[in-house]
Image (spheres, rainbow, N blue to C red):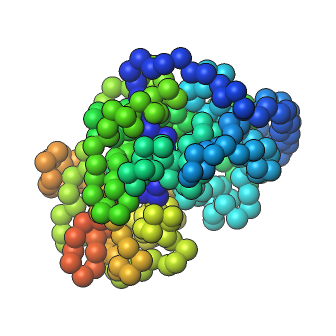
Amino acid sequence: MLRSHVAVPSGAAASPQFRRPSNAWRGPTVVTCTARSGRASVSSCSVTKEMEVAHLTDSEGARGEPTLGERLRLGSLLEDGLSYKESFVIRCYEVGVNKTATVETIANLLQEVGCNHAQSVGFSTDGFATTTTMRKLHLIWVTNRMHIEIYKYPAWGDVVEIETWCQSEGRIGTRRDWIIKDLSNGEVIGRATSKWVMMHQDTRKLQRVSDEVRDEYLVFCPRTPRFSFPEEDNASLKKIPKLDEPTENSRLGLVPRRADLDMNQHVNNVTYIGWVLESMPQDIIGTHELETITLEYRRECQHDDSVDSLTSAEFEGASENGSSNGVALSMQNPQHQFLHLLRLSGTGLEINRGRTVWRKLKGKKEKL
């Protein structure tokens, strides 16, 4: 399951009027960025914003002063308090061979802004983004599904602005959405959405979201549904069929490192993304870039597990109920789709299944 930095749950129904915490810290922050020649139409930008950082509540319920890190953070709640924006500079170690940010970098930033949103509204600071009732009952949030679309990868030194918010998702979970923009010109360069479910931290069993917990976070959620993918039949809604074997590509015996474990003691979501990409065919990796990735999480992975990564090209006409049989996608199509499966090496139990869509890199020729 995905790392439970967990998005602050959210509700779409009518919620109480948001009131800014009386002890919120306010201070000016100036962001200055300079675009390299040939990239942005704006040579430089200066953004001044007022940060509002709520005093955080620790595990005992006590209020504390904002830390230095919180004061320097380039993010804040929006005026209505129902969403959160934060800006990030892409660093040199966050880019890959194409000299642009990797999908793992994007996923890390989504986690970071989600966690900071949770802290900004006063939820627990232990990384679980839990409410008071959840902490009493040893409940945490874990990711059930993640969908990311990237239309343009930022380069080293670019500044991205990410907005995020949460809302209810039925009676058993919540959802978090994100919109990623190029801060220099306001262009939307990516979108993402995710679904979360509640789990007991000790028994690892899923729990229903109680009315008490729901009431604790609804105040910080949009009053009417708001989606990063409002289009009907958008790709984030597509079911992922079961990957038939034998598969075309595989990478067997992947083992989690200590650094791959999160605060919930299971493998975090960025590691899963990396494992999925391990079994991608090299001719696609060298000539295409990832445009869309969807992952469904079905089982936790522990530190002593061994994982197999399996990949095959997706077939047109794949059935919704589990078969990937059909007619192969045309190789003339500038986009290629693949189905993925991560499973435990010993038992074959499914950890997650996924789908990726790849677009051709400019100037790159495919191998015939």
Residue at screen point 45% across, 33% down: 216
Q: Nearer the viewer, residue 211 or 83?
A: 211
Name the residue located 71 percent from the left edge and 52 percent from the top edge. 90
Percent x, y of residue 25 = 77, 34
Q: Is residue 283 left or right of residue 70?
A: left
Q: Which residue is painted at 50% across and 78% down in the image? A: 257
User: As displayed, is residue 220 above or below residue 140?
Assistant: above
Residue 125 versus residue 281: which sits nearer the camera? 125
Q: Viewed as shown, does residue 203 lie left or right of 42? A: left
211, above or below 247, in the image: above
Count of numbered marks: 0
On the image, the x and y values in percent for residue 33 come to: 83, 41
Looking at the image, residue 117 sits to the left or right of residue 323; the answer is: right
Residue 309 visible in the picture: yes
Q: Residue at x 68, y 36 (%)?
A: 54
Assign the N terminus to one quadrant of the image. Answer: bottom left
Residue 211: x and y in percent read: 33, 32
- Quadrant location of the C terminus in the rendered image: bottom left
Residue 106 lies, in percent from the top left, at 57, 51
> Above or below — where is 155 with respect to 307?
above
Q: Is residue 43 left or right of residue 199?
A: right
- Would residue 6 be visible to someone looking at this image? no
